[in-house]
Image (spheres, rainbow, N blue to C red):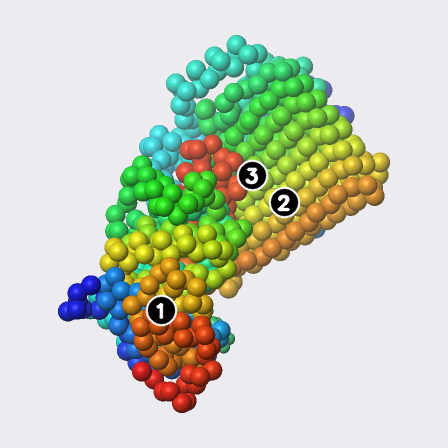
Amino acid sequence: MASTPTVADIGSDYNRRYGFHDPEEYFMRTPKGLSHEVVEAISLLKKEPEWMRVFRHKALDIFLAKPMPTWGDTARLATIDFDDITYYVRATEKQEKSWDDVPENVKRTFDRLGIPEAERKFLAGVSAQYESEVVYHSVKEELTKQGVIFLDMDSGLREHEEIVRRYFGTVIPSADNKFAALNSAVWSGGSFIYVPKNTEVAIPLQAYFRINAERMGQFERTLIIADEGAKVHYIEGCTAPVYSSSSLHSAVVELIAMKGARIRYTTIQNWSNNIYNLVTKRAVADEDAVVEWVDGNIGSGLTMKYPAVILKGERAHGEVLSIAFAGPGQHQDAGAKMIHLAPHTTSKITSKSISKGTGRSSYRGLVKIRNGAHGCKTSVQCDALLIGDAARTDTYPTMEIDEDQVSVEHEARVSKIGDEQLFYLRSRGLKDDQARLMIVNGFIEPFVKELPMEYAVELNRLIELEMEGSVG
Amino acid sequence: MNENARPVFSCHGVHVRIGEKEVVKGVDLAVLPGEVHAIMGPNGSGKSTLANSLMGHPAYALTGTVELAGEDVTALAPDEKARRGMFLAFQYPVAVPGVTVASFLRAAVSAVRGADVPVREFRKEMLARMEDLEMDPAFAGRYLNDGFSGGEKKRVEILQLLMLKPKFALLDETDSGLDIDALKVVAKGINAAASNDTGMVLVTHYQRLLNYVRPHVVHVFMDGRIVRSGGPELALELEERGYDWLEPAAVGGV
Ligand SMILES: Nc1ncnc2c1ncn2[C@@H]1O[C@H](COP(=O)(O)OP(=O)(O)O)[C@@H](O)[C@H]1O
Ligand SMILES: [Mg+2]
């Protein structure tokens, strides 16, 4: 690794400095590990504008300077080997893995969920691209008519540089946290959406319409802007397990809801268990805007994710509805942040978690009400369900309320599948595992009912798989 | 009812322990198809313990034998008993949040009938039974027993009885906490089940329900035992004189 240049040096003479004469050929994938050369190569390969290149290099310096988080699952975080990660692989290079390398349990789950062949290969990282062309094209035509921009982030930057430049990194600055800095340095893929004033996108926009390796990369970057009075629902991820041999998923998602706009962002995350899922998601809501995060975490070994809404304009409303399923060996550290900056803003956090076997779930939340933000209302509800004696759950709620005239509700509950509930259901002919599954499905129902039909069905089926063979 | 009919349900020498404590101390019962027995007894005498343990509650240790339709079901799990046609209407039905009455009922009906019932057919049947029980159809979409009033819970128990059509049902204080209109509706359901040949044991400590459901046999239950059995007139006598004159020590088992 070469010595780290200062940001001011970067960009003036990269050819002389790094000597990448033919990056297209040389950098089909960057070498393992993180350095300014790697960042430079990524930016060069993408033919990015100067400001983005500088942005990346600055972010890398921040990443290198920032210590690891001192909270959360620090023991597990310490096991991330940043030198052993490939930070950028071109989409076309992702095909080299063989179907035989995909773990048996992942294949079995594909079977059980009935995922079509072409999708399986993509989800398992065997093929680079899966496009459901027909759906995507009809959707795209409709969007174009409305003036809605829906692109992957790289294309967004190329085709709408002015908008991207204006908003990129404004909601989540690189210095926000170590992983946001990492993403800012090496991001690739993700979605870019702009919805014009008073425009309502009738159907949920799904990354799934056109999932490809770029879009569902390890370091994806998403920016959604809903102009005044606009309305959009975006869905990220899918219930099928996504297998990747690379261990770190560190995304950044920024949402901007202008006056009177509405954004709902739904995530179903089912990464395979070897993955650290460390994601920063934050929205800014102007006057009368509504932002809802609907966030489901089923997979990954360790998730740390706390979707946030900054309630900047009067009467803005923020909501986080989340479920986490922590199976044996998994740790789901999830939560929410609501920052009330303006009067009469309201927020609601509903967090549901299921821990099974040695699974562990944590709720970590922050509600902040600034002095002068009078008439605010917030309610936080955390429900944890434990299955088995080894399962664990913790809550770390933080309330920073600097204003008197507000209404704050907080409720936390931990439960187990009750013997009396089980007996009741079994006395109606349901077998033990059927009865347990019914109770668990009931527990997550408030979440499931917010999902589009096909996702709801898949999620229930997935929970069924996760519940298999559970005792206690 | 046929004099020669064989009991649809019987139990012999049933004892139940909760931990160290013996709560049920030797109970024998034999119920014919379509026959209604009433078990009446003071609070805390062990009626619910008997009913729950007969259904197979895992927390209670039952000894003795339990037969359903001529087969020994003593050691079977509650779901197995249910699938063979046994039913318990709970004194305190538990809530299962997030599970609608309709989806729960459909799962139960499918489990007990051994085949998935088509949605349309199922809905039709469910709505008809709900109408019989004067229930608002909106009930089907509510979460099972979640936030239900006492009376609503009891109606839902009877709805299940009518949908599952068991061979034998234990009804544990299905009459308590009901106003007179609700009581009549519940009685109507019980009578409908009886005319479908369901044998039943009604556990109650009021005579009230028996004004609308005429039992064939009345048992007085005290301190874990049946201390006396008789016809419907026994219920009236209990109403007038209370239980004190029937001290278990003085009377002995039946
Ligand atoms: N789960 C239990 N654990 C301990 N004691 C119990 C339990 N259930 C019932 N009992 C006791 O058993 C006795 C009979 O209770 P129960 O069967 O509920 O009476 P009844 O239904 O006739 O009012 C009471 O003394 C009660 O306290
Ligand atoms: Mg009782």
Circle 2 crowding by C-alpha within 10 Å: few under 14, some 14–19, many from 20? many
Q: Residue furthest left?
A: B4
**Residue B13 visible, this orientation:** yes
Which mark is nearer the camera, 2 or 1?
A: 1
Tell me what residue is drawn at x 65 percent, y 51 percent.
A411
* Above or below, comparing residue B150 to residue A221 in the picture: below
Which mark is nearer the camera, 1 or 3?
A: 1
| Disc nearer the start of the sequence (2/3) | 3
- Which sits in the foreground, B16 or A38? B16
**Residue A243 visible, this orientation:** no
Q: Position of residue A8 (x, y in %)?
A: 76, 25
The residue singled out by tag 3 in the image is: A295
The residue singled out by tag 1 in the image is: B38
The residue singled out by tag 2 in the image is: A335
- Which sits in the foreground, A170 or A430? A430
Chain identifier of the residue bearing label 3 in the image:
A
Chain identifier of the residue bearing label 2 in the image:
A
